[in-house]
C-alpha cells in the first residue's frame, strides 16, 4: 500500500490572487507559488493581501522548497513575507527568479533563500518530489506547468497557461511533453488546472493580435504621442509596442521603476531587443515633437503612485498629458482595481487625451485558456481526478462542469476552497475541509496582518466618523472643572454645527456631574458615563453611530 499524498490549498481558490498551495509526500512539503492579492474597496488602508502563512511557518522544518510557476505578483509577490520567517530554496525559470529576486532583495531577506533555475523540459528531484517542468504560454514569458510523480501517481499543476499557437517568442505550451507524461504507466492521477477563463467560450486570442491593434493606433495618430501602460512583467507586450514604435520612426522612453528594472532584466536574457539609439530617458521626452515619441509605462491597474496615475494627476516630473496624447491601457483591470482604473481614465480624458482600453479596442488579450483550450487539455491528459484551481468560485464551478463534459466521472471532480486539502490514496481521493488556516493576511505599509478588528474600526471611521469628548475633572472629588470639549472628524462639520456641539457638551456635562453624587469618582466610570451620554445624544439627534472616544483629564 502506497503512502497517501496531500495537496493543501492556502490561497487562490475562490479569488483572483493569493495563489499558494503545497504538495506533501513522505513527510516533506513542496510549496507551489506564494502570491498576493490587491485589496478591495472595503479594505481601507490595506496595501496588499497575502495568504495566511501559518501552515508553512508551523511546518518550516518540513519545507523542501518553493516552486514558482511564473513571475506574476499574484503567484510570487508573497515570497518576501514568507522568507521573513523561514529559510527555503526557490525553484523557477531564470526570468521568474530574476523578477522575484528584486522584491526579495528589497525586503532584505535574500540571505534566507537560494534561487535555483530550472529549464524547459527538465526533470529534477527536489527532495522526494520527482518534478518535470513543462513550458506553457502565458502573458509573462517562461511560465511552467509541472508534473509531480508521487507514490500515488502523477499530479499535474498547469500554472497559468493558454494554448497560443503563435506566441511572440515561439515558446508554445508543450502539448507533446504533456501527452508523453499522460501516456506513462498509470496516466495522470490528479489534474489541477487554471480556471480563470472557464466561463469564456472559444479560444483566447494570440498575443500577436495586440501588436496588430497597436500598429493601427500608430498609423491613425501619426502626429500624437503614444503612451502605453502595461504590466511591467508583460515582456512580450513591451517588445511588440517597442517594435511598432521603432518601425514608425519613434523614440521610446520607459517610465516606472518596475518597468525599467524588468525591461533591463529581460534584455540581459535576450527576451527584449531594441537599439540603444532609439531609447531616450524621461528627461529627454519634452525635447521631441509628440509624433516622434512613444512612452511605455506602469500604471495599467491605476496604482496611485504609478507613472500613468501621476500623469493623470498632473504630478509627473517629466510628462504632462494633454490633447496631443493617445493613452493606451494595455491590460484588463484586476478585480478590486476597477475603480482606480476608471478614475485614471477619467482624469486623462479631462486633460484632453484620447484613451484607448480593452473595452473599445483589441489592445489586450488574456493570458489564460478559454473553454476550448481547457477541453483540449482535459482530453489530452484524461485525468482520473480533477480539481479546478486559480479563480473565483464561479470559475471553479464552470471548470468542474467542463471536466465532467469531457468525461471525468462526476464523483472524481472536486471543488475545493482555501484551507482545504485533497488526499490521494490507494482507495481514491478525499477532501479534508478546513485542513489549514487560510484567512487573509493584510499588509499595511511595513506592518503585517493589521487584523479584522482594525479593518472593522477603519470601515466604521470611514462610514460614521470620529467624535472625541475631553472631560476635565477634579482629581480628588471627581467634579467637573470645565465644560466638556468636543472634537469631531467625519460626524458633523464643526464650524457649521456649533449649536449641536454645544448641546452635546451640555448632555455630557450633566452626566458627568451626576457621577460624584452616585459615588463614581474613578476615571473608568466617568469615561463610561461620558461615552454613554454622548453616544446616546448623537444617535438621538442624527441617527449616526460614529466612534466615540472619551478622554478624562484629572487636575
Image (cartoon, rainbow, N blue to C red):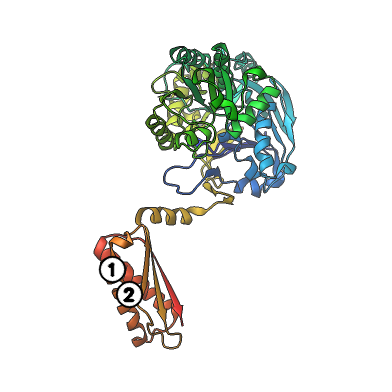
Report the residue at 69% width, 46% height from top: 86
User: The N terminus lies in which quarter of the figure?
Assistant: top right
**Other residues around mark 1 within 10 Å, as few (<14) / some (14–19) / many (≥20):** some
User: How far apart are the alpha carbons under marks 1 and 2?
Assistant: 9 Å
Depth check: 521 or 396 in front?
Answer: 521
Mark found first going from the N terminus, 1 or 2: 2
Residue 409 vs 45, above or below: the answer is above
Report the residue at 48% width, 56% height from top: 454
Mark 1 touches mark 2? (CB < 8 Å): yes
Q: What SS does tag 2 mark?
A: helix
Depth check: 468 or 38 in front?
Answer: 468
Where residue 258 sits: x, y (%)? Answer: 60, 33
**Other residues around mark 2 within 10 Å, as few (<14) / some (14–19) / many (≥20):** many
In the rendered image, which residue does mark 2 sit on?
508
Where residue 27 sits: x, y (%)? Answer: 70, 41
In the rendered image, which residue does mark 1 sit on?
537
Q: What SS does tag 1 mark?
A: helix
Amino acid at each position: 500500500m502506497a503512502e497517501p499524498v496531500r495537496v493543501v490549498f492556502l490561497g487562490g481558490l475562490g479569488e483572483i490572487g493569493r495563489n499558494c498551495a503545497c504538495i506533501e509526500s513522505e513527510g516533506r512539503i513542496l510549496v507551489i507559488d506564494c502570491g498576493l492579492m490587491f485589496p478591495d474597496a472595503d479594505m481601507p488602508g490595506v496595501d496588499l493581501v497575502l495568504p495566511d502563512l501559518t501552515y508553512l511557518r508551523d511546518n518550516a522544518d518540513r519545507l523542501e522548497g518553493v516552486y514558482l510557476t511564473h513571475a506574476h505578483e499574484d503567484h510570487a509577490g508573497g515570497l518576501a513575507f514568507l522568507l521573513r520567517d523561514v529559510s527555503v530554496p526557490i525553484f523557477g525559470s531564470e526570468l521568474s527568479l530574476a523578477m522575484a529576486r528584486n522584491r526579495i532583495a528589497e525586503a532584505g531577506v535574500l540571505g534566507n533563500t537560494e534561487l535555483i533555475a530550472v529549464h524547459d523540459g527538465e526533470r529534477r528531484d527536489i527532495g522526494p518530489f520527482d518534478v518535470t517542468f513543462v513550458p506553457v504560454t502565458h502573458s509573462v514569458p517562461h511560465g511552467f506547468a509541472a508534473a509531480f510523480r508521487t507514490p500515488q501517481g502523477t499530479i499535474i499543476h498547469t500554472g497559468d497557461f493558454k494554448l497560443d499557437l503563435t506566441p511572440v517568442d515561439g515558446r508554445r505550451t508543450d502539448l507533446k511533453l504533456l501527452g508523453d507524461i499522460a501516456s506513462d504507466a498509470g496516466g495522470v492521477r490528479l489534474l489541477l488546472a487554471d480556471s480563470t477563463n472557464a466561463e469564456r467560450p472559444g479560444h483566447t486570442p494570440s498575443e500577436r493580435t495586440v501588436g496588430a491593434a497597436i500598429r493601427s493606433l500608430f498609423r491613425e495618430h501619426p502626429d500624437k504621442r503614444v503612451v502605453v501602460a502595461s504590466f511591467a512583467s508583460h515582456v512580450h507586450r513591451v517588445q511588440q509596442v517597442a517594435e511598432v514604435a521603432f518601425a514608425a520612426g519613434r523614440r521610446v522612453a520607459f517610465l516606472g521603476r518596475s518597468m525599467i528594472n524588468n525591461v533591463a532584466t529581460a534584455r540581459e536574457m535576450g527576451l527584449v531587443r531594441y537599439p540603444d539609439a532609439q531609447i531616450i530617458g524621461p528627461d529627454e521626452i519634452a525635447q521631441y515633437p509628440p509624433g516622434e515619441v512613444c512612452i511605455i509605462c506602469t500604471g495599467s491597474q491605476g496604482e496611485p503612485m504609478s507613472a500613468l496615475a501621476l500623469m493623470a494627476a498632473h504630478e509627473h516630473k517629466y510628462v504632462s498629458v494633454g490633447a496631443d496624447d493617445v493613452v493606451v491601457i494595455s491590460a484588463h483591470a484586476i478585480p478590486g482595481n476597477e475603480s482606480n482604473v476608471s478614475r485614471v481614465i477619467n482624469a486623462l480624458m479631462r486633460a484632453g487625451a484620447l484613451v484607448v482600453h480593452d473595452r473599445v479596442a483589441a489592445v489586450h488579450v488574456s493570458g489564460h485558456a478559454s473553454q476550448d483550450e481547457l477541453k483540449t487539455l482535459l482530453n489530452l491528459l484524461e485525468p482520473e481526478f480533477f480539481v479546478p484551481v486559480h479563480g473565483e468560485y464561479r470559475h471553479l464551478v464552470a471548470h468542474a462542469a467542463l471536466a465532467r463534459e469531457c468525461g471525468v466521472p462526476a464523483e472524481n471532480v472536486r471543488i475545493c476552497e482555501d484551507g482545504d486539502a485533497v488526499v490521494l490514496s490507494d482507495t481514491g481521493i478525499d477532501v479534508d475541509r478546513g485542513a489549514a488556516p487560510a484567512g487573509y493576511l493584510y499588509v499595511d505599509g511595513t506592518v503585517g496582518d493589521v487584523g479584522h478588528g482594525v479593518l472593522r474600526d477603519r470601515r466604521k471611521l470611514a462610514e460614521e466618523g470620529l467624535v472625541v469628548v475631553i472631560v476635565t475633572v477634579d482629581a480628588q472629588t471627581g467634579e467637573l472643572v470645565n465644560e466638556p470639549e468636543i472634537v469631531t472628524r467625519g460626524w458633523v462639520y464643526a464650524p457649521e454645527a456649533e449649536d449641536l456641539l454645544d448641546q452635546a457638551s451640555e448632555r455630557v456635562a450633566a452626566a458627568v456631574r451626576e457621577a460624584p453624587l452616585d459615588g463614581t469618582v474613578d476615571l473608568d466610570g466617568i469615561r463610561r458615563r461620558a461615552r454613554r451620554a454622548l453616544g446616546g445624544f448623537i444617535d438621538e439627534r442624527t441617527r449616526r453611530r460614529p466612534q466615540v472616544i472619551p478622554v478624562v483629564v484629572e487636575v
